[in-house]
Image: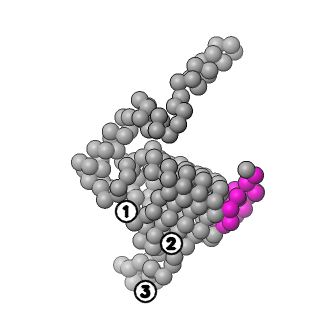
């Protein structure tokens, strides 16, 4: 028991204190090198101006707030389709496997996308759980937590915890 507490204290002491320290720590440096090789040499997600995890596909037409790009470098299997636009607020966190789809196909012609729907807007300080899906036209307010595996089909106000398929309000997010 005492040994476990000692191990935890030492582990906690060695953890990075801020985002920049985390980005360049030895535990993520290898992943960053792999991401760089896939993006710059293999040309996967080459048009995206920030580093993306090598298993993710991200559109170049998305707009990111501050401190969002590092989560795309670490969270694998994300798919961000930005045909109608995707706007992501500051300090938003993405877990692995998040899918953001901003356009549907036209009903009469499946080779074209419906561009009449507005962009997806995700507010500041949101947390999108693993394997969550956000569908066209959705607007999430600030400080919204989306549960893992949720399918978000409609817009939600700020300070909420939402989950389910389709997503519904679970409770108010007390800050």
Whole-angstrom CA distance, mark 2 to mark 3, is: 22 Å
Q: Which residues are magenta?
A: 156-174
Q: Nearer the viewer, mark 2 or mark 3?
A: 2
Residue at the spot of label 2: 119
Q: Nearer the viewer, mark 1 or mark 3?
A: 1
Where 92 sits versus 27, above or below?
A: below
Between 135 and 64, the residue placed more toward the observer is 64
Where 70 sits versus 24, above or below?
A: below
Q: Residues within 10 Å of mark 3 (few under 14, many from 20)?
A: few
Residue 166 painted magenta: yes
Give me the residue at 41% from left, 78% from top: 113
Image location of residue 19, percent across then percent down? 50, 40
Image location of residue 42, percent across then percent down? 25, 50
Whole-angstrom CA distance, mark 2 to mark 1, is: 14 Å
Whole-angstrom CA distance, mark 1 to mark 3, is: 27 Å
Relative side of 80 to 39, left or right: right
Relative side of 37 to 162, left or right: left
**Element type at mark 2:** loop
Q: Quadrant of the N terminus?
A: top right
Relative side of 30 to 155, left or right: left
Asked whether the beta carbons under mark 2 and mark 3 sit within 8 Å of each other, the answer is no
Give me the residue at 76% from left, 57% from top: 172
Relative side of 130 to 103, left or right: right
Between 164 and 2, the residue placed more toward the observer is 2
The image's mark for residue 108 is 3
Residue at the spot of label 1: 60
**Element type at mark 1:** loop
Q: Residues within 10 Å of mark 2 (few under 14, many from 20)?
A: many
Mark 1 or mark 3: which comes first in sequence? 1
Give me the residue at 56% from left, 62% from top: 122
Mark 2 or mark 3: which comes first in sequence? 3
Q: Looking at the image, can residue 167 be seen?
A: no
């Amino acid at each position: 028991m005492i040994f476990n507490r000692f191990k935890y204290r030492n582990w906690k002491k060695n953890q990075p204190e801020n985002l920049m320290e985390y980005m360049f720590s030895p535990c993520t440096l290898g992943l960053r090198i792999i991401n760089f090789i896939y993006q710059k040499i293999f040309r996967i997600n080459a048009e995206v101006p920030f580093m993306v995890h090598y298993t993710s596909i991200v559109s170049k037409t998305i707009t990111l707030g501050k401190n969002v790009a590092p989560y795309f470098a670490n969270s694998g299997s994300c798919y961000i389709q930005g045909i109608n636009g995707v706007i992501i607020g500051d300090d938003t966190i993405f877990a692995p496997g998040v899918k953001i789809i901003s356009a549907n196909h036209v009903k009469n012609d499946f080779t074209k996308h419906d561009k009449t729907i507005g962009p997806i807007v995700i507010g500041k300080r949101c947390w999108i759980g693993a394997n969550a899906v956000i569908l066209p036209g959705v607007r999430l307010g600030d400080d919204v937590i989306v549960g893992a595996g949720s399918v978000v089909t409609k817009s939600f106000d700020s300070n909420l915890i939402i989950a389910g398929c389709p997503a519904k309000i679970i409770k108010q997010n007390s800050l």
